[in-house]
Image (cartoon, helix red, strand yellow):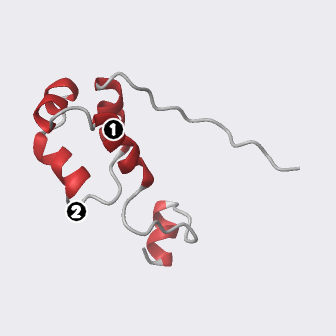
């Protein structure tokens, strides 16, 4: 991502994941025991979107997609503060 785009979207320029956003790995772990068809039925997320997320070109999924998958699979998304170093 260019510095101009990072400034416009408010992302940190120093954080660049190599392949995909780490949340993709977390979602894959949650969904691993189930076929994509079952995950699509439970979450309401299209099978094509799940395939692109786990095996395709999706690098960083939108929050609404992450939320639908986690809630549909019985997990939660938690946002909290990081402990400050002394």
Q: Which residue is drawn at 67% across and 39% down?
A: 81
| Front in this rendered view, residue 6 or 78 | 78
- Where residue 63 appears, as percent x and y from the top left, is 38, 42
Q: In the displayed structure, would residue 29 be above or below residue 52?
A: above
Residue 15 position in % (x across, y down): 54, 66
Give above or below for 74 relative to 84.
above
Up-down relation of residue 62 to residue 17 (above or below): above
Q: Point out the residue furthest to the right here.
A: 86
Task: Judge the density around disc 2: few (<14), some (14-19), many (≥20) Cα neighbours within 10 Å.
Answer: few
- Residues 12 and 39: in front is 39
Q: Mark 1 points at which residue?
A: 64
Q: Residue at the spot x=20%, y=32% of the render?
A: 34
Q: Residue 28, located in which quarter of the rendered image? A: top left
- Label 2 belongs to which residue? 57
> Where, by quadrant of the figure, is residue 30 drawn?
top left
Residue most toward the top? 74
User: Marks 2 and 1: in contact by CB < 8 Å?
Assistant: no
- The reply, left or right, for residue 1 in relation to residue 86 is left
Disc assigned to residue 38: none
Look at discs 1 and 2 and give the one toward the viewer.
2
Q: Please determine whether, in this image, residue 16 is positioned above or below residue 81.
A: below
The 10 Å Cα crowd at callout 1, few under 14, some 14 to 19, many 20 or more, is: few
Residue shown at 82%/50% (left/top)? 85
- Quadrant of image for the N terminus: bottom left
Q: Is mark 1 on a helix, strand or loop?
A: helix
């Amino acid at each position: 991502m260019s510095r101009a785009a990072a400034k416009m979207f408010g992302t940190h320029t120093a954080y660049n994941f190599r392949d995909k956003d780490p949340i993709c790995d977390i979602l894959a772990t949650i969904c691993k025991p189930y076929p994509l068809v079952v995950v699509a039925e439970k979450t309401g997320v299209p099978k094509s979107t799940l395939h692109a997320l786990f095996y395709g070109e999706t690098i960083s999924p939108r929050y609404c997609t992450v939320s639908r998958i986690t809630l549909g699979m019985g997990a939660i998304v938690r946002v909290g503060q990081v402990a400050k170093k002394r």
